[in-house]
Structure formats: C-alpha cells, structure tokens
Image: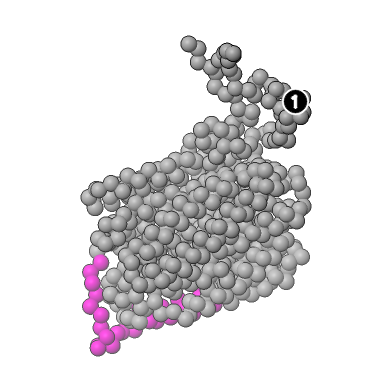
Amino acid sequence: MTVPDPIQLSWPLPGTESALPAAPVILALGTGLLLMLPLSRAARSALSIGVTLLMTVLSALLVWSTGDGTVLSHTMGAWAAPFGIVLVADRLSAWMSLLTSVSLLMTVLYSAAFPDRVREQYHLFALLQLLAAGVQLSFLTGDLFNLFVAFEVMLVASYALTVLGSTREQLREGFRYIVMNLVASALLVATCGMIYGLLGTLNMAHLAQRATELGPSHYVSAFSTLLLIVFASKSAQFPLGFWLPGTYPAVPVAVGAFFGAILTKVGIYALIRTFSTMFTQEPLIAQTTLLILGSATMLFGALGLVSQREWRRILSFAVVTSVGYMAFGLGIGTPEALDATLFYMTVSVLVTSAMFLLAGIAEKATGTSYITVRGMLEHRPLWAAAFMLGALTIAGLPPTGGFIAKFALVQAGFAASSPLTPLIYLGILSALLSSLIILYAMLNIWRGFFWGKAAKDKEVQLRPVSLRQQAPMLLAMFTVAATALAAGPLGGLTSRIAAQLADPQQYISGVLGDRPVQIPPAPTAEDPEAPDHPSSISPARRAPKAEEDHP
C-alpha cells in the first residue's frame, strides 16, 4: 500500500518560520492547566516562579532574535498565511512579550511571598498563568480574529481574578468591569465579521496588503474607527475607562499590579498594530480621535489622583493618566512620537508594577489602605527612597526615565508638522498640566504617609515584613531605575521598533513572504474553464488521488 504525498500548499511558508513565537503562549497555557492539579502550595509557587523565569528567558530570546529586523512567524499546522493561524514576532511584539514576562515574574514572586489561602484554594497561580497566556497571545498573534480569541482567554481569567474572594467591593466593581468588556468584545467580533466581508481576510499582514490595494475607502475608515473604539475601551481611555479606578484596587495586590502594568497596554498595542500595520491609508481620523481622547484622559486621571486617599486608588488613576500620554503620542503620528510613546510605555509598565507592590507591602505593614499614617520615613527609610523614585518617575521629573519619556513626547509634539497642530498643542498643555497635578498628588502621599510623626493616639503597630517579602518590590524598583541608567540602549531599542513600524512591508514580507497573495474569484458551475474551477486547478495544487474510484 502506497501512502499518497501530502497536499501541497499553494503558498510556501516564509523563510523566517520559527517555533519561538509560540513558546511563551504554549508555556503559560500549559502551566496554567498543570497548576489546576492538586499540588502543595510550595510546589505551585515553585512551578509558577520557575516557568515564569523560563518565559522571561524565551521572551528575551525573541527580542534578541528580532533585533536585526527579522520578523519571525509560526504557522500553526503548517497552513500558510493568510489561510492558517499564524503567530508573529517582530520587534514590537517581542518587546511587549518581554515586558509581560517581567511583570508576571514580579507578580508571582509577590504572590509566593504573601500566602493567600482563600484565593489560592481557587487556583490563583493557575489563573495568573492563563491570564499571561491570553496577554502573550494578544501580542504575538498575526490574525485579527485570533486577537479576539486572545482577548477572551485573557478576559475570562481576569474575570475570575477580579471576583476571586467574593467581597462586596469585588463583586460590585467586577460586574462593571465584566459588562464593559463584554460589550467591547461583542463590538470587536462584529467588526471582524464586517472587515472579513469587505476584504476577505483577517490576517493582519494580508489586511495591510488588501487595504493598500483598495486605497482610501469610507468602509475601511468606518471599520478602523470601530476598532479604535474597542481598543480605546480596552485601554481605559476617557470616557470609556470609568471601570478601571474602582476595579484595580478591589483585586489582590499582586493581581492589581499585573492588571495595571499590562492589561491597558494590550489595548495600546492593538491601536499601534491597527494604525501602523493594517490600516495606514487615512490616518487623520484616528489621529484626531486619539489626540482628543488622550488629552481628556490625561486630565481625568490626574484630577482623580488628587481626589483619593487610598494607595491603590491613587495608583489606579495614575494608570489612567499614563494611558492618556500614550494615546497622545499615537495621535501625533510621527516616527519620533511613536518612539517616545514606546519608551514611555516601557517606563509605565515597570513603574506601575513596582508602585502597586510598594502599596501592597505598605498596606500589609500598617494594616490600612489609607495614606494617612505619617512617620514612615523614620521607620522604613528604604520604602521612602523607593517611593520617591517611583513618584518622580510617574510625575516625569529628572533624572528618571519618566522625565526622558515625557520630554521626548513633548518634543515630538512641537516638532510635528501636521494639520492637527492645534490639537497637538492642546495635548502638550494637558500633558504638562497633568504632570504638575500628579506631582502634587505624589507629594500628598509623601506628606501623609512618610513625613512627620503620627499622633500618639494614632500610632500604628507595624507588622513585620521580611526582606523576602520586600524583594519583589525592590527588584521592580531596580528595573525602574534601569530605565534612566540605561536610557541610551533602551531609547535605541524603541527607535528601532518605531522604524520597523514605519515600514509595514517588513511585517507583510515576514508573514506572507515576498510573493503577494492573490485570491481568485470563487468558481461557478456554469464556467468549468474558469481558472479556479476544480477541473482546471493545476496538479500541483490538487491533493493527489491514490487510485480512481470503481463504478
């Protein structure tokens, strides 16, 4: 018995085929499922930390492998793009994968250091890994519908983490978070269907190719605007980000640190991918919208900062403000602004994770979530130094990475030559004013928590926090300091990422190869001579028959 040859695909796989883009996704997903088994707490903690370290190494290898501009792709089941599912790693997605792994590492280290018997009973470590799998897939997928699937994997895990513990505050804020994301997800899948109906594909590289071939189109503009609305809600831009300031303080500290550092950046990444790779024909609509949303979001978040007196509520509004800065950078629309936005995104991920962990150990030590304790500078000078570093970074003051990023954003705004110059100047004014308000809010924390001495009738008995429990926060703060100390190499990396995004053809070639994909019209029964009629398909494109059927 002879085995027939395998079916020959019509399009060859690109020369950059690699299994590396799939590694972080598969590793996180497999670990999440494995952690569902009835293991001891020590085994779950060790497994989660060990796998996250491995994920960080693999993500770093992705960054190194794509550093020369190579676009790695992995076609699932060897079905070549645009027909099969493809995972893609260019400079941007590889860098976001590494930031995700680093933030997850801080999260699991903190979770391992502070036992939470109730939540761990319901698979806290497993849900964190499943959440990371969805995030990694969001950054590494090369297909718009698969991005929707990644969002759902991410959101299902985040829904469980949001209500894990079932406190009244969690259920109230979790309901708002879930409803908002369900509406956004429904709009996303509907938009995917309409885009497929117009362009005949959902592969991101093929969408970029088809949109270029089609040229300026009202339909493409409408669909890209719908995507902008979806991703603006995912990244919590004003007025669609009303759910964030209440949700992130309601979840466990480590979960809130990962949420604040990464989840909003998934929406920002999707906006970058949409308007820098897929739909680049009519940028003014997107830029105008993003400049308006960014300016409003910066001020909304900054004003929310000064209205709060709880650690994590203040930091949640800081997350909202950071989203506004990134939306403003994308709205400027120049390569220099995109470079500055990517630098700022890196700083924001690291400082948000570090400050949430600092808030967590401060709450553990004092037994309260409020900042009105006073006198902690005398008792915890190391925490005070760490807070000052984080506060200056968030406010954007020298000599921190936050200052470098915000200065680059403002400089890119002044240098931009655009018909949207009045909106850009309005955004610059909002950015500067927001920084001043943030500085005032950070000084409020310093004055309320670290400075002075507590009244004798309000002295707090500090609970011990071991060095092992402080280590994740200190490690996170070290990465924040590194954004300033290594600003040159980091700025060079973000510049190369922005340069690659400015040339979408690199992404298209890495996924589809050098030969453009051409999908002929559907065959008809009345026209057997049509090029795509089954009787006219060349033998090389047919599946070979083992033998003819007998009558």
State the residue at coordinates (42%, 66%). 174
- The colour scheme applied to this rendered structure is one colour
The answer to whether residue 252 is left or right of residue 539 is left
Nearer to me, 401 or 520: 520
Is residue 271 visible in this depiction of the protein?
no
State the residue at coordinates (28%, 75%). 366
Residues rendered magenta in the picture: 436-465
The residue at which mark 1 appears reads as 528
Residue 434: give x, y in percent of width and height: 56, 75
Q: Quarter of the image containing the C terminus? A: top right
526 shown above or below 94: above
State the residue at coordinates (66%, 19%). 539
Locate residue 68: give its quadrant: top right
238 shown above or below 67: below
Neighbor class of circle 1 (other Cα within 10 Å; few <14, some 14-19, many 20+) is few
Name the dominant secondary structure of the magenta segment.
helix
Q: Residue furthest front?
A: 551
527 shown above or below 345: above
State the residue at coordinates (53%, 73%). 301
Locate residue 459: give its quadrant: bottom left
Q: Give yes or no for residue 438 being in the magenta stretch.
A: yes
Residue 111: give x, y in percent of width and height: 31, 58
Locate residue 24: give its quadrant: top left
What's under tag 1, amino acid-wise?
A: Pro
Instruction: Kindly state the secondary structure of the residue where label 1 is placed.
Output: loop
Residue 506: give x, y in percent of width and height: 64, 41
Q: Give yes or no for residue 82 being in the magenta stretch.
A: no
